[in-house]
Image (cartoon, rainbow, N blue to C red):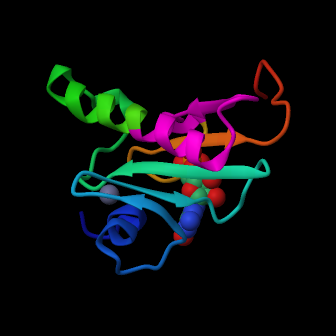
Amino acid sequence: MADCLFCKIAAGDIPSNKLFEDDQLLAFYDIDPQAPVHFLVIPKRHIDSAAVLTEDDAALLGHIYAVIAQLAARLGIAENGYRVVTNVGADGGQSVKHLHFHVLAGRSLAWPPG
Ligand code: 5GP
Ligand code: ZN
């Protein structure tokens, strides 16, 4: 999608610090980390947010969570735990309108979020 930051990152037009990539998704470190470990997982295909997901996206979402589990094991954060969150819309705090999952770890995370 034109003028979408994460489409440009997925296409390699804007550089990112990549953790994992395949034909469907990309995982890369957040530019403004909110925890000692903070990376994002995005589908390469443009999807506005979780608000427009359908049953047809089930396989993609399963793949995203499987890759997150593999990365968590690889980065050594699985044992102590981590948080996966996707912000939706203005009240959800979504600033980039391309579906992405934050993975945060490396400190005890507060609940409820602010
Ligand atoms: P949101 O606020 O939409 O849930 O999350 C967007 C995230 O993207 C933020 O955590 C922000 O720091 C991150 N971000 C914004 N621009 C860039 C960028 O150019 N590169 C990377 N790696 N992360 C970015
Ligand atoms: Zn996009």
Q: Residue shown at 21%/29% (left/top)? A: 59
Q: Is residue 5 above or below residue 90?
A: below
Is any atom of residue 94 visible in this view?
no
Residue 68, magenta (yes or no): yes
Residue 31, horizontal then vertical, whole percent = 64, 66
Q: Quadrant of the N terminus?
A: bottom left
Is any atom of residue 42 visible in this view?
yes
Name the residue at the left extreme: 56
Residue 101, horizontal then vertical, whole percent = 49, 41
Q: Quadrant of the C terminus?
A: top right
Q: Residue shown at 72%/56% (left/top)? A: 33
Residue nearer the viewer, 14 or 70: 70
Horizontal placement of 33 versus 30: left or right? right
Horizontal placement of 85 versus 26: left or right? right
**Which stretch is magenta?**
67-92
Q: Residue shown at 35%/81% (left/top)? A: 13
Q: Residue shown at 40%/70% (left/top)? A: 9
Residue 93, magenta (yes or no): no
Within the image, what quadrant is residue 60 found in? Answer: top left
Within the image, what quadrant is residue 21 found in? Answer: bottom left
Query: Which quarter of the frame holds ligand 2?
Result: bottom left
Horizontal placement of 4 versus 106: left or right? left
Residue nearer the viewer, 86 or 73: 73
Residue 34, horizontal then vertical, whole percent = 76, 49
Q: Is residue 4 above or below residue 57?
A: below
